[in-house]
Amino acid sequence: MKSALVVGGTGPSGPHLVAGLLDRGFEVEIFHTGRHEIDEMPDVRHRHGDPFSADDIASAFEGLNADVVIATYGRVRLIAEAAAGECRQFISVGGTPVYKGFVPPDVNHPRGLQALFREDAELVPPEGIEGALYGAGAVRRTEDAVFDLGKSGAFGASVFRYPSIYGPRNPHAWEWSSVKRILDGRTFMVVPDGGLAVHSRLSSWNAAESILLAVDHPGKAAGRAFNCADDDQFSRAQWHEMIIEHMGGQVEMVSVPGDIPSPGWGLVVFKYDCSPHVIPDTTSIRTLLGYVDAVPARQGLAKTVDWLVANQNDSVSWTVLDPFDYEAEDTFIEAWMNARDAIAESAERYVKLPAMPLPQTATGKGPEAST
């Protein structure tokens, strides 16, 4: 029987990943701290220890002889070194911040990432970027270490670059900002730049599906990094709109310029010090591994919202940036609306700008004349 070790397993994608491996005939074990046992986990053997501790990692991997090791969290470089020679396939999970210009965006010209950036776009340097809010250099160094071990023959190496993840048990529950306001009866929420920004998302179900495709096609996956994302992507405003509609809420989104500090900064992954758009090309995983969504995005979001509502007493994580300071939020919204009204008076002439003239047809007449 084939065997697999999953480092993690009890997070957003873990139960789906373990279930998929069992369906494929694998004998599965998970290695994690044991602090977050969950009812949804299939009945598999657990190895308990700290995936961030070199000693615990070495102990957990002693005598391991697995077909595949999947590292979804922990000190992945140390995990990869411990797995070298102990497995035939090693799959690690990283993220799109490894691309130069995600954070901080000012290192690229023009600022930030292209609206759809290529898979071979420039990565952050291994030493990182001085003054960066997020240590993406460590993500790059981890990728390099995994691929170096793969090139040395230690195992077939693959790296999966996740965007923003959503789903039940996600410690970074960005949907909670909308969900909690609806539950609290709020009628307004501040959204930077009208919520026009698009940061690709991937549900926990589709994250597991992505990795399972590499298990199905180890030869095609070896030596490659794969960008991952749902088939359908939405702007931040559309994401909030779908949550509001699903919950039957009445919440107006108040647009504020993104460079103005506001309550809306709590809705953004790296406050507002990141690329306005983060939309990776996902051609490789689709053409080489045959990726399609296991769960459509709209359905996945609805299931996530339902889970947050059902688990609201313990769903708020310290990683949620939103302070939910409604008194300060009301003060800000009143000040902003007053300023917006004053600006509108001085901009009246722009409101009255005429529409662009209709294009001419081949006969030289407007389209209304050709009917």
Image: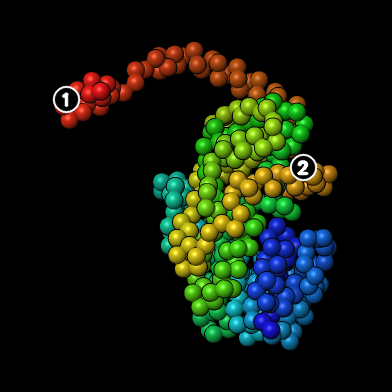
Q: Which residue is drawn at 74% across and 37% down?
A: 180
| Residue 123 location (% of width, % of height) | 48, 61
Q: In this view, does 114 lie to the left or right of 45?
A: left
State which quarter of the image contains the N terminus: bottom right
Closer to the camera in the image, 71 or 212: 212
Q: Is residue 147 visible?
A: no
- Residue 122's place in the image compared with 174, above or below, is below
* Amino acid type, callout 1: Gly
The image quarter containing residue 88 is: bottom right
* Circle 2 residue: 309
Q: Which residue is drawn at 51% across and 73% down?
A: 221
- 363 left or right, relative to 35: left
The span from disc 1 to disc 2 (Cα, nearest Å) is 59 Å
- Residue at 75%, 47% (x, y): give it: 307
> Disc 1 marks which residue?
364
Kind of element beneath mark 2 = helix
Please state if 106 lies on the left or on the right of 312 as rendered: left
Q: Which of 129 and 24 is in front in this view?
A: 24
Please, what is the three-letter code of the amino acid marked with disc 2?
Val
